[in-house]
Image (cartoon, helix red, strand yellow):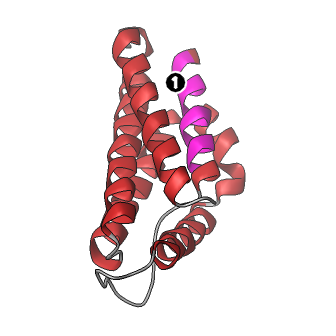
Amino acid sequence: MHRSAFLAPIALSALLLAGCTGTASGASADQSTEEACGVLNTAGAELAEGMGIEDAFAEASADPTQAAERLEAFADTLAQTAQDEVGNAEVRDAALEFSTQVGAMADVLAAAADDPTAIDLDAFTTTVEEFGAASVAFEEICPA
């Protein structure tokens, strides 16, 4: 259980730092980067509030399965918002890659919650690196 308790705060802290997801006025291809990021940031703030993010770290350590479910919900919402409401291709592509990596972190966390002794540390390291790279790439386009 130590490994799964360790994974949740890493994933959740990256999400909090990124501050992303969406609700806006349409997905025009000529949407500015600022407009597209605004859509994602607004939705991210709404999702974080709805998830009770202030307690997320404590809950993730206590219940890694619930943390994985929250990450998956976040990834799904981010991807749906990017597809539906972000017309700026650069922002949309970065958001979709980030959502994919958030989903991968959710999968790792869920697997660790199911059987902490079965974690493949090499695969975990790769997932964390890919998650970090996607997070940084998104943050460069859409600073929080």
As rendered, which of 71 and 132 lies closer to the eye?
132
Left or right for 15, reference 31:
right
Left or right for 50, reference 138:
right
The spot of residue 68 in percent (x, y) is 44, 41
The spot of residue 10 in percent (x, y) is 59, 33
The spot of residue 135 in percent (x, y) is 49, 44
Q: Residue at x 47, y 71 (%)?
A: 33
Placement of the C terminus among the 4 image quadrants: bottom right
Does the rendering let one see residue 120? no
Placement of the N terminus among the 4 image quadrants: top right
Q: Is residue 80 above or below residue 35?
A: above
Q: Residue at x 45, y 80 (%)?
A: 23
Taking the view exactly as shown, the residue that stands out farthest to the bottom is 25
Q: Residue at x 64, y 47 (%)?
A: 56
Q: Residue at x 51, y 34 (%)?
A: 64
Question: Does 4 lie within the magenta span?
Answer: yes
Residue on which disc 1 sits: 4
The spot of residue 7 in percent (x, y) is 54, 28
Q: Secondary structure at mark 1?
A: helix
Does the rendering let one see residue 46? yes
Q: Quadrant of residue 54?
A: bottom right
The stretch in magenta equals: 3-15
Amino acid type for the residue under numbered disc 1: Ser
Q: Main secondary structure of the magenta part?
A: helix
Q: Is residue 27 above or below residue 9?
A: below
Tell me if mark 1 has few (under 14), some (14-19) or many (20+) residues whose alpha carbon lies within 10 angstroms of its own: many
